Image (cartoon, grey):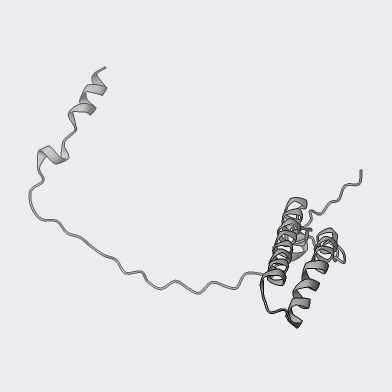
């Protein structure tokens, strides 16, 4: 087994097999739904005319097109796998601008402090005595 020093980039990897299969099935089902619609339109629309032949051609040839497209591999011409380490090269950080003097907000309180707010809580005294 061959090991690589560089990890492949997630964005350059091929689609997951499950995702590719789901996309194929979805496309096949849509194509077959169009085929059924063509067949119904061919039979139900009267008077018959040139459009009847178009619907008939759709009903006859769409299964072949759907199967060929569903079985076609999506992983054909892919480029090489990219390495994220090559993408992470950076230059030196720009020099920081000098900081300006920050505003200072001063709050002054006037009045006598209350003992019940500042004093120790009863729960703290109980814990200390144990």
**Rendering coords of residue 59 (x, y %):** 77, 67
Residue found farthest to the left: 112
Residue ranking furthest to the top: 130
Q: Residue furthest bottom?
A: 50
Residue at image coords 77%, 62%: 12
**Where does the image place residue 24, in percent across and percent down from the top left?**
76, 58
Is residue 88 something that shows in the picture? Answer: no
Residue in the foreground of this view, choosing between 6 and 41: 41
Q: Is 9 rendered above or below residue 116?
A: below
The front one of 121 and 58 is 58
| Identity of the residue drawn at 79% across and 60% down | 83
Task: State the image quarter where residue 6 is shown.
Answer: bottom right
The quarter of the picture where the C terminus appears is top left
Left or right: 53 in relation to 108: right
Can you give x and y, in whole percent of width and height, for residue 80 in the image? 86, 63
Question: From this viewpoint, is residue 71 visible?
Answer: yes
Give 88 or 58, whichever is nearer the viewer.
58
Residue at the right extreme, as displayed: 1
Quadrant occupied by the N terminus? top right
Which residue lies at the image location 10% right of the left edge and 39% below the top edge? 115
Residue at horizontal 76 percent and vertical 82 percent from the top? 50
């Amino acid at each position: 087994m061959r090991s690589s020093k560089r990890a492949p980039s997630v964005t350059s990897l091929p689609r997951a097999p499950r995702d590719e299969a789901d996309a194929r099935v979805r496309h096949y089902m849509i194509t077959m739904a169009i085929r059924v619609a063509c067949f119904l339109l061919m039979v139900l629309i009267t008077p018959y005319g040139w459009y009847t032949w178009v619907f008939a051609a759709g009903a006859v040839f769409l299964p072949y097109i759907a199967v060929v497209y569903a079985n076609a591999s999506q992983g054909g011409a892919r480029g090489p796998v990219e390495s994220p380490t090559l993408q992470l090269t950076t230059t030196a950080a720009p020099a920081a601008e000098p900081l300006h003097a920050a505003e200072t907000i001063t709050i002054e309180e006037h009045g006598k402090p209350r003992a019940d707010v500042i004093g120790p809580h009863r729960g703290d005294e109980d814990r200390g005595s144990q």
